[in-house]
Amino acid sequence: MTAFVGYVLPWGQMSFWGATVITNLLSAVPYIGDILVQWIWGGFSVDNATLTRFFAFHFLFPFVIAAATMVHLIFLHETGSNNPTGLNSDADKVSFHPYFSYKDLLGFAILLTALASIALFSPNLLGDPENFTPANPLVTPPHIKPEWYFLFAYAILRSIPNKLGGVLALLASILILMVVPFLHTSKQRSLTFRPVTQ
């Protein structure tokens, strides 16, 4: 979500048409689809109101993600992580702080340095040349294609001719990742005792 609303902010041709195509997917929702689309747009088309809303979302989402991360770390620190082998391993426990917290901070610093280096020294490295053209709702770019991180969604949507079916398949492909942990009900969650690893 953060990547999508951030992609719209340059307000070039690809940004504008990407916002138009993706927000129009909500029109596939029965009965309230058109109302949802107009609510997200802030009017009857993708315009300045849409850009303002997406900027607000893009600004607020990192704080929501940071808060969720902090809540996750607090709960993980309080209760400890799950033991996938199902065996008692209290003797093998390593405290989260300082060992893992410093390790996480080091990884975060390395990734932040790499991201800042790309953003400051070569900001147009991964940009689409078509996105340097200012947004024009009257001219559709000849070859609209999503960025690499949206290609899976594009492939799913293009493979199903029905709009509602494509949207449902896209939602199912994302939601299946949330269902997978609940499908395995064994006490032992590790592959240590499985025949494959013997």
Image: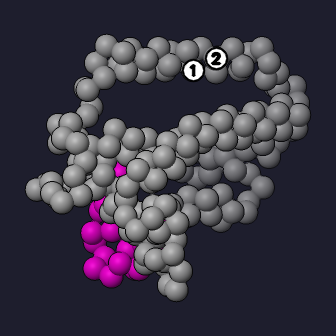
Q: How far across and down, in percent of the image, does residue 140 sit?
A: 16, 58
Magenta span: 150-172
Q: Which amino acid is tagged 2? A: Leu
Read off the residue under disc 1. 108
The answer to whether mark 2 and mark 1 are in CB contact below 8 A is yes
Q: Is residue 29 magenta?
A: no
At x 87%, y 25%, the residue is: 91
Farthest residue to the left: give it. 142
Q: Is residue 118 above or below residue 162?
A: above
Task: Give 39 or 93, whichever is nearer the viewer.
Answer: 39
Q: Which amino acid is tagged 1? A: Phe
At x 15%, y 57%, the residue is: 139
Observer able to see residue 2 = no
Image quadrant in which the C terminus is located: top right
Q: Secondary structure at mark 2?
A: helix
Task: Give 63 or 191, whichever is nearer the viewer.
Answer: 63
Q: Residues within 10 Å of mark 1 (few under 14, many from 20)?
A: few
Q: Is residue 78 left or right of residue 41?
A: right
Q: Secondary structure at mark 1?
A: helix
Examine the image and state in which quarter residue 95 appears.
top right
Q: Is residue 134 left or right of residue 85?
A: left
At x 80%, y 18%, the residue is: 97
Read off the residue under disc 2. 105
Q: How far across and down, in percent of the image, does residue 96 sit?
A: 79, 23
* Mark-to-mark CA distance, 2 and 1: 5 Å
Q: Is residue 53 left or right of residue 77?
A: left
Q: How is the image coloured?
A: one colour
Q: How far across and down, in percent of the image, does residue 70 sit?
A: 75, 33
Observer able to see residue 91 = yes
Task: Give 51 or 119, whichever is nearer the viewer.
Answer: 51
